[in-house]
Amino acid sequence: LKNTPANIVIFGGFGDLAWRKLIPAFYNLFIHDYMPKQFAIYAVHYQGLPEGAYEKHMLEGVNLFSRSGKAKKEEWKRFTDHLYFFQGDFTIEDTYTRLKEKLEANDAEWKTRATRLFYYSVAPNFIETISSFISQFNIADNRQKDRLVIEKPFGTDLASARALNELLNKLFYEDQIYRIDHYLGKEVVQNIVAFRFANHIFEPLWNNKYIEQIQISVTETVSVGTRGSYYDKSGALRDMVQNHMLQLLSLVAMDCPGNYDAESIRHQKVKVLKKVRPFNSASVAQHVVRAQYTKGVVNGKPQVGYKEENNVSRKSTTETYVSLKLYIDNTRWKGVPFYLRTGKCMDKQASEIVVQFKDTPYKIFKDDVVPNRLIISIQPRQRISLLFEGKVPGLEMKLMPLEMDFSYKRSFTDEAPEAYETLLLDALHGDATQFIRADQVETAWAIVMPILDNWVKDSSDMKKYKAGSSGPVEAENLFSDGKVKWLSLP
Ligand code: BG6
């Protein structure tokens, strides 16, 4: 696979994602010798740029964002021999005529029909136009070799996601369509399947008999920053829950796939998502909390309130925080609450999954016993820890919670690849395991739709939280018994 030549076309090749993520990822794959010998990247952008300006800007991106630090001159030079700025308007035929010539010329030179990867790093309203032209010009006509990588947001609701799927499925085969969710490329996220199914000791406990509740938190300290115009139309539920968080949920909750391959894994993931108990007006009111940040201090820096951010409506009813409780109605999970929360401008950045086990059935100790807790920390720490009770050294039988801790930093010397490196390489190799299938994206939209529908009717439930805080106090009310709360390592 490694030596299969590849033509890569990035629509939006001069955009922010290309600058921060895509070009640094390709560069890292290149210097670590994962790219084929023969490859070309065409970065399509509607405006022309002065000679050398594209490379200069991308070098700056690599120097700022690449995990390998600053690019070495010689390596960067070798990389740019494969990198071409391509001025072209996505909406006119001429762009595709010229692109086709390039792709075919490379095939002729390389004496093979190269893999073609078309990366849509564009605003959603361009997806249809670009796809129609790609189809019209027959440049992705080889089902085995040609793939389209589509960035989120994939639709803005169930109806638009369905319409987009229909359009794409009319023009291409589903197995050519790689809907990307960068969370699935994260090292610890990929480890969830290994942890659960390559060990015999956890799976027997992974059910409602032993598990009390599961929490999935993605808290961020960043604000909406320069993304106000996108974010104000989106909000935390669309931006994080519909995609990243429901993907995490499906990895944690799914049954064991028959094989480790794209179809078996995606089948199990969608199967469990279909079992999420549908929300209705009553459960939205009771089990979902939305909020907006107000003025505060984050990481020691003053932060304006959400409504004061650039390109955000002063009357905005868009949530920057959401937490919710959901249930999965199957035999494994019946009665186990899953708590999900995400927000911007919070007190700390942490993506974590906490599996809280039940109390011991019978108490023989005087001391209170803290139930076992398994914590999968995705970022910024990368670790998996198990909290257990043990005896404090000494003459008495005194207990305290202790921790078994697996940390990536301690166990591995090699730095983990960036999510985009993993996913881009998978896409080049035609491995769709970590990409989203049409039915997955629609199922995830179906879960959040009743929440969105209820929210548009009435926004009086919008809560507030101070920037730099741990979220709205009302989020604690989700824990109806009052005993449990948002958990982490002690
Ligand atoms: C993106 C969202 O998909 O994920 C952003 O649009 C969010 O709003 C980001 O900040 C979080 O990703 P990560 O990898 O920084 O956790």
Image: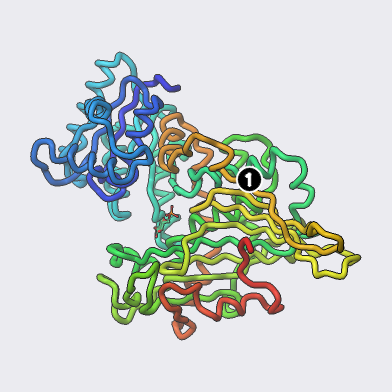
User: Residue 403 location in percent, x, y?
Assistant: 69, 54
Relative to 399, residue 76 above or below? above
- Residue assigned mark 1: 406
Give how far across and how far down residue 465 sits, in percent.
45, 78
Above or below, comparing residue 139 to residue 410 in the picture: above
Q: Amino acid at mark 1?
A: Phe
Q: Is residue 173 visible?
A: no
Q: Quadrant of residue 38?
A: top left
Ligand 1 in which quarter: bottom left
**Residue placed most toward the observer, 143 or 42:** 42
**In what element is the residue under mark 1?**
strand
Whole-percent x, y for residue 20 in the image:
31, 47
Q: How is the image coloured?
A: rainbow
Q: Residue furthest front?
A: 395
Q: Is residue 125 visible?
A: yes
Tell me which residue sits at (45%, 22%) in the image.
1
444 sits left or right of 256 in the view: left
